[in-house]
Image (cartoon, rainbow, N blue to C red):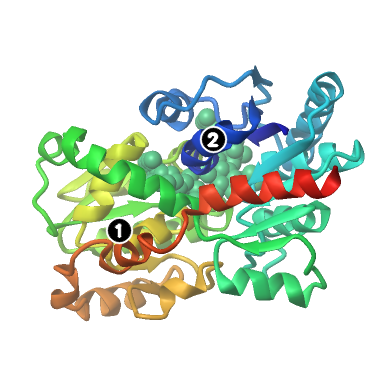
Amino acid sequence: MKIISVVGARPQFIKLSSLSKELRKKHKEIILHTGQHYDDELSRVFFSELSIPKPDYNLGIGSFEHGQQTGRMLEAIEEVLLFEKPDMVMVYGDTNSTLAGALAAAKQNIPVAHVEAGLRSFKKSMPEEINRVLTDHLSSLLFCPTPTSVKNLKKEGITKGVYLVGDVMYDSLRENLDVALKKSKITSRLNLQKKEFYLITVHRAENTDTKKNLEKITRIVNSLDRKIVFPIHPRTRKRLSEFRLLERLLSKKDIILIDPVSYLDMLILEKNARCVLTDSGGVQKEAYFLKTPCLTLRDETEWVETLEDGYNKLVGKEKEKVIEAISSLDETKLVRNILQKPQKKESTEAKADVKISQIILEFEEEKC
Ligand code: UD1
Ligand code: UDP
């Protein structure tokens, strides 16, 4: 199969990293980078650190309002599809690059495969929810990471082409954790002691785009009782400056405000943090895989399985909920072995990326 992988934003490079290696064993893969993320620390660093092949196309779209950004991508992706005539287009997650890739392909009658299909927040005000729902309804192959995501699709009448394959981000973590443990110098560089700091990331429009909500986030940060590491997404940095909230954070003792870090450094920060506070989907999951407690700065999550054993808690934007959750952090859980359960599973189950590559092969054979 000739497959075009459409990516454009940070988490998509991580989802692509292990899958791309697997796809290339059986198929011809072309990587198309929309250019939605373009700063080195949101894009280039992942390609070099994770040895992802250089994109065959970089559309250089950049930042615009949703309609303009998605529309520009749609037009430019279509041009590549008309030229390359691929057998399939793979899209990842729920960004504007995901929707543009799926729509461009579907309109050209090219089968779409969606990695991380079926996730729902049931909140239409989230741009990601619109992207996910539409992409799933355009896809021929839907690769679901969790049982809940399969059920969500069934409720929307989607049952054909649905496969529960597991999580490609877990594959990437498994492949890179040992490397990160050997290579990353982030804890010594930032002078961090294990389990003695909080790690926070924030970038959702809901949390960053109004002064009221971003102020609530800064109140949470200012209430934390240990060192804080805060790698700031450019969207959030821009808003913090605009709303004059950056000064408030800078006045806090023991806060380390840094640019976004590389994936290997991020894994080490997540593994060693006393607790992670985040509104990121990927960071919630990685904290869960690494058995680090996580407080999710949202009222809902697409990754409901992470809530089951109490490692992940939804705290919204309320400082009081955060303080309460932190005071009840179970110290014994903090020293549990990382990846204990998943490692046992590994011997009997193929990884998500292997399953996806095989299913695509079978899809091709059925067509012939
Ligand atoms: C996007 C995705 C979100 C995903 C996130 C991962 C959509 C609608 N949102 O959000 O689902 O969780 O990526 O990080 O697709 N900017 C820079 N440099 C860059 C990229 C962006 O400075 O390289 C700034 C620009 O001011 C831009 C803003 O960040 O306007 C937002 O970027 P955008 O890609 O639109 O959305 P994200 O918040 O990154
Ligand atoms: N990440 C990273 N550096 C950072 C913050 C996040 O490498 O400074 C990684 C993180 O480990 C995870 C992914 O980016 O693999 C999550 O992406 P993001 O939070 O941007 O988006 P989401 O998952 O919410 O869509």
Amino acid type at mark 2: Ser
Q: Secondary structure at mark 1?
A: helix
Please say if 236 is above or below 4: below
Instruction: In this rendered view, identify the residue nearer to me: 212 or 5.
Output: 5
The label nearer to you, 1 versus 2, is: 2
Amino acid type at mark 1: Val
Please say if 285 is above or below 228: below
- In the rendered image, which quarter contains the C terminus? top right
Instruction: In this rendered view, identify the residue nearer to me: 192 or 235.
Output: 192
Residue neighbourhood size for the residue with mark 2, other residues' Cα within 10 Å, grouped as few (<14), some (14–19), many (≥20): many
Residue 42 screen position, x and y as percent: 46, 32
N-terminal of the pair, mark 1 or mark 2, is 2
For this view, does 34 lie left or right of residue 39? right
Residue 167 screen position, x and y as percent: 50, 57
Please say if 206 is above or below 264: below
Query: Any mark on residue 221, and which?
Result: 1
Residue 227 screen position, x and y as percent: 16, 53
Query: At x 36% / y 28%, what residue is drawn?
Result: 49
Residue, disc 2: 20
